[in-house]
Amino acid sequence: MSDAASFFTRHYGVTAADCERYLAAALGRGGEYADLYFEHEATSSLTLEEGMVKSAAQGISLGVGVRVLSGERTGYAYTDDLAPEKILRAAGVAAHIASGAARTRIAGLGETNPGRNLYGPGPAPTDADMLAKLALVRRAEQAARGHDPRIVQVRVGYADELRRVWVVSSDGRSSSDAQPLARLSVFCLARENGVTEKGHAGGGGRVPLEFFDHELTPESLGEQAAREAVQQLAARPCPAGEMEVVLGPGWPGILLHEAIGHGLEADFNRKKTSAFSGLIGRRVASDKCTVVDNGTLPSRRGSLNMDDEGQPTQCTTLIENGILKGYMQDHLSARLTGARGTGNGRRQSYAHMPMPRMTNTYMLAGHDDPEDIVRSVRRGLYAVNFGGGQVDITNGKFVFSASESYLIEDGRITAPVKGATLIGNGPDVLTRVSMVGHDLKLDQGIGSCGKDGQTVPVGVGIPTLKIDRLTVGGTHE
Amino acid sequence: MNDTELTELAARIVAEAGRRGATAAECVIRHGRELSVTVRLGETESIKQAEGKALGLRVFRGQQAGVTHSSDLAWPAVSAMLDAALTIAGTASPDPAAGLPRAEELGQLAGDLDLYDPAAAAVTTEQALEWARRGEQAALATDPRLTNSDGGSCDAGESTKILVNSLGFQGCVRRSSCSLSVVPIASHEGAMQRDYWYSVARGPEGLEAPEAIGRKAAQRTLRRLGARKVATQRVPVVFDPQAARSLLGHILEAVSGESVYREASFLAGKLGQQVAASGLTLVDDGTLRGRLGSSPFDGEGLPTRRTTVMDGGRLESYLLNCYSARKLSLASTGNASRGLAAAPGVGCHNFTLLPGAITPEEIIAGVPSGLYVTEFIGFGVNAVTGDYSRGATGLWIENGRLAYPVEEITVAGNLKDMLRQVTAIGNDLEIRGAVNAPTLLIEGLTIAGS
């Protein structure tokens, strides 16, 4: 038995034999499939503001979710008490979704761990000393304050977690994983002549604390946030209307997440409620665009050894040279549509049902030189940093909000402009991608995605991209 | 454990924190039950049922604070949590503004606020499924263009919050809620649209009829069919009550004491000043009987109250918890919100923009050319500067009448100006949840389109 599974046996006395009993109870009224999702999550966090550590917090959440599938129906129950009678009761409640004869034969449990470790060696960040985390937070603050005298306020947050999960299913699979996650974020205010602007930066991943000593230092995050805030002090009103838009590499990949990612989640397509329903094999992007969802990148925020249904994650091609190739599947949608699983079944916690979700979604590098891309634009917007985004799956309209962008005038990047929302239509925005840079970059590990009230960590990425026409929602006509 | 026993447990934890060296402590326990069902195209899609509980602890060592939470209420886990909280408090900096409220601030409203309807806890799975099914069916029966659905859903549940601190405050409040929503999908000439409607109340009696919810959802969805883009221009924008409610959410962030003391709000330093049009009066009230945002005490154990945030456009008060109040040399307004995992934040109770005298039809009739916005998407609002730019969906107004649906456009301006440019406030205030506003007209916003 793997470490994460034996954790539940050691600490809470839950054995494989118990699980078979719970699964039998879950299928006590029929149903084709049942699974148990045990979760133990330890968290810690620190917030530094006004030079003070204002809040230090730790927490533990523990529980098990029981799911029963019967045709297209899902029965779900959870309990935060791992006593056998409580789990049996939850199993009995979830069982009510079906109404047939008991299915008592549970395939003998065999271990089906993915057998890989994407999270690197070293201790989980949650095990590191609070003082070491405090030192990171202080370093980030000093870097931000030291960047420019116009920085008047700095807030730094550090948060980590270790999520131990064990998924046991009625088809005999028993898979477990211990998933670390850490994030350091910096928020700054800059002020000059009565104008106040903000800047933000953050990053991390499924990494030990030492990551922040080598890969992404607190100093670089502090400076990034401070630079953005100071830069915005000189920002002009953003233009409004359709224009050429160049997206910088990395985090602007949130475009893919909103414009096409959600629309390619299998649940929406199975129900034919997505603007992408029925478009497999059709052109949805220019032939320069190849987009993947890849849960197997080492240490990335969106990566997982296995998804929350116990399936190994994989690299799934969504769009290849502009042609729509596939959807992101969870167990239910794959089974109902006869598709192969893609390891995209995720959930926020034991209190939530799994559904198809993205991992790390990005566009592969092209051949264009990023400088040539900018040079090719007569009048447009160069957007390099973003806040959040949102999409209406059904009509395909998406938005994402730039927090740092610049005018491009006659092929040159000129003045910074105020934040603006970019809006477009998912199924056709990528058909207007005319240039793709060779500079693919993934984000630093900052993204969280919300769907149906559930939040999960994700990653995005793009090379520098040129979109020939996109509506920019500024104030300046 | 019943609520009396849980309150005793919380008191025992607070006392034990003192024995182990805490100078002050606060314990919050939450427990609840939920039932949640969805029906899609007439068939049961999911049933979820659960019970949960969890405990949060905040301890002080002088002016240093530590926060812990756990879902394990057994004593060995609680004991470990106490030690962890005291240890991590040692990591925090001494903060002169940190601490529990002053003893004389503590208290709770007397009497029953009608926050609990036993009928909510008694809703059966079968009833919930039937209401969801009836709502969806009514929507789909409205028009043949309603060809698909994201379903009808019904939730019912109850939750109890217990708060005990070392100054002797003990509070326990039980609330219930029920909600019903329907999300139909219409298609026409190859394009699909969805919209929704919902009702939420303390108990099933307070819900609108499933058929009424379904029909309203259907109308809202159908009117989006055939939506087009409009040209980039500057026009008056009418916010329907749903859109106006989202605007109130941004104002809420700007008047929250946490944004204000950090100077991360465009309304910081504006107390007593005229910041909005003279028709604008905004009130937060935690004392209203039966309403979703009401509570006898706030997240720190202060009685809730009625706070006038803006009166005739003049900024009268921020919404404050004890921490932000101390930072601003003001008194708490009883707006502490307490999750389990973090120190108290600031939240509203029932936050309302008071209605005007004019009907929404009259407001629309006064607009020669403009936008009637029914939904915003995206997060393009900057509370520091007031800069506002959001994706919008709605109907175009021509010669005072709703003419055709529009989409893939943005509405942009700055909240500082937008508040002043409110030139009409509707009389159509409807209570639906904790944040409520009537129809609003705001002049001079930039629409970006084609």
Image (spheres, coloured by chain):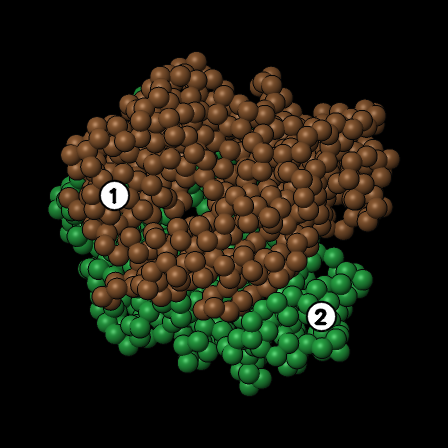
Chain colours: A brown, B green
Mark 2 and mark 1: Cα distance apart in space:
54 Å
Identify which amino acid the numbered label 1 is placed on.
Answer: Tyr
Which residue extends farthest front?
A: A214
Question: Tag 2, which chain?
Answer: B
> Is residue B220 shown above or below B251?
above
Q: Secondary structure at mark 1?
A: strand
> Is residue B349 shown above or below A413?
below
Nearer the observer: mark 2 or 1; the answer is 1
Please identify the quarter of the rendering in which residue B164 is found. Answer: bottom right
Disc 2: CA contacts within 10 A as few (<14), some (14-19) or many (>=20): many
Is B18 positioned to the left or the right of A453 in the image?
right
Which residue extends farthest right?
A: A17
Identify which amino acid the numbered label 2 is placed on.
Answer: Ala
A319, B333: nearer the viewer = A319
- Please name the residue that numbered disc 2 is placed on: B10
Question: Tag 1, which chain?
Answer: A
B373, A132: nearer the viewer = A132
Quarter of the image with the C terminus of chain A in it = top left
Q: Is residue B91 visible?
A: yes
- Please name the residue that numbered disc 1 is placed on: A406
Name the spot of residue A101 as percent of width and height, x first: 79, 26
What label sits on residue B130 in the rendered view? Answer: none
